[in-house]
Image (cartoon, rainbow, N blue to C red):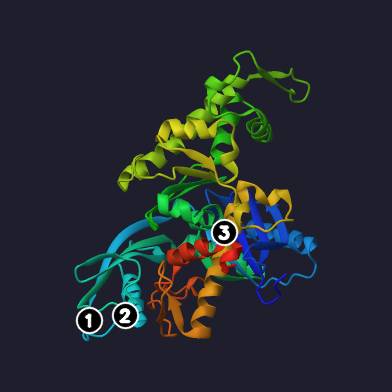
Amino acid sequence: MNQEQPVIVGLDIGTTKIAAIAGRKNEFGKLEILGFGRANSNGVQHGMVLNIDQTIKAIQTALENCYASNPNLVISEVYVGIAGHHIKSLQTRGDIVRQQNEDEIRQEEIDKLIADQYRTYIPAGDQIIDVIPQEFTVDNFQNIPNPIGYSGVKVGANFHIITGDKNAIRNINRSVEKAGLKTKDLVLQPLASAAAVMCDQDLEAGVAIVDIGGGTTDLAVFYEGILKHTAVIPFGGENITNDIKTGLGVLKTQAEQMKIQFGSALSDETKGNAFITIPGLRGMPAKEISVKNLANIIQARMSEIMDFVTYHLKQVGLDNRMLNGGVILTGGGSQLKHLLQLTEYLTGLNARIGFPNEHLSGGHIDELSKPMYSTCIGLILKGYNDYDNKNKILDSNFIKVAGTGIMQEAPVNEVQKPEEESEPAIVKRKKTIKGFMDSFKTNLIEMFKEEEDGQL
């Protein structure tokens, strides 16, 4: 165990479960899980905290279970995932004209360019969660991953801006704080899940990460190493369970059990003469449920979710010829039988299940390899990105230009968000060029290099 590395905790506040996982990187750059706890979630619907008291109790229960797995843990701050149908994204363009255009571009200028995007007009009641640079331009030079060291009159960039409802963000922060914790950072859940299940080849080939949770399905689309699109689809596993409950006239617990045990996303793959016997209530006769009818209900809802995914891919012009990495399904809902076949049929893309165990060291419990923990594992990875980047700047005052191996001088100063961002728990360190997605990319590449390369 590498004792110099900090213990970082991810907190996934979901519709069906709340999970807390504590991890630390070992000497090979893999995550060793030091504590794990989960609890049923009752105060969250469609990814949004609606009942703060119930959510606080669930967070505390998850923490208690985490402490029970490792009494030596001390947890004070957490990385928290955020989702919900209030999450929106937009593309913007920013440019600055340089006064000293013969000098090399400095980090302060990039920070100012990014800080300017926090003044982008968004609807009243919304708040900017993240500003993620995509590609930069310097005068006539296009698609520059890192403009530091270039010279020119005008430097600009395309940005992916993620916004959310202020009240929804406030409810998450209050729940975490009243549970005795501090929110270190809010991370969009599909980006956290992507960090847990993607490798550098996926990033280069182009993939769509589809995280099917309890209340929402989260989408993140990457192409040529750049985050192109994010979306939160307001349907998930809970909707399927409720459809089964209503359509077949059974209890919700029975519907959930049937979905997991006998459910299929393709009705053609089920036997027409197979039936499930449900015990009758209070002396009533037992009920016979057709497995094919069950599959028809599941297929209808999953088809609707995949239609949304296809719609978003078309919105950003990434059809089936361009995403060579296909679709990576993760989250608890991704384990439905025959879902891969349905996904490939509806999207025209190859599909696979994304497990979060690529970044985990050996010896962890099998439970943590399940796709439902992708977000939580990804939150820990995000925490390590922040920690590693901060240390590189503080220790050497240099940053590495992504993909080149060249070290460039970088100032230590940080830019604050504009004053209108009033929530203290979500005020974040400014995303520099070595920021959100660039850090994901370079850290993923480093993580997947062979040990003999001397990078682990």
Question: Tag on residue 386?
Answer: none
Tell me the CA gap for discs 1 and 3: 37 Å
Tell me the CA gap for discs 2 and 1: 9 Å
Which residue shows up at 48% across the image and 31% down it? 342
Residue hosting label 2: 109
**SS state under label 1:** loop
Decide: is 303 above or below 142: above
Q: Nearer the viewer, residue 401 or 187?
A: 401
**SS state under label 3:** helix
Q: Quadrant of residue 156?
A: bottom left
Q: Farthest residue in the front direction?
A: 452
Tell me the CA gap for discs 2 and 3: 30 Å
Q: Tell me the amino acid under the disc marked 1.
A: Arg
Decide: is 257 above or below 416: above
Q: Position of residue 36 (x, y in %)?
A: 71, 58
Which residue shows up at 56% across the image and 30% down it? 338
Q: Position of residue 77 (x, y in %)?
A: 63, 71
Residue hosting label 3: 378
Question: Tag on residue 98?
Answer: 1
Q: Tell me the amino acid under the disc marked 3.
A: Gly
Residue 266 as seen in the image, left or right of residue 421: right
Which of the marked residues, 1 or 3, is nearer the chain's N terminus? Answer: 1
Q: Tell me the amino acid under the disc marked 2.
A: Glu
Which of the marked residues, 2 or 3, is nearer the chain's N terminus? Answer: 2
Q: Are marks 2 and 1 in contact (CB under 8 Å)?
A: yes
Which of the marked residues, 2 or 1, is nearer the chain's N terminus? Answer: 1
Which quadrant of the rendered structure holds the C terminus? bottom right
Q: Position of residue 65 (x, y in %)?
A: 76, 59
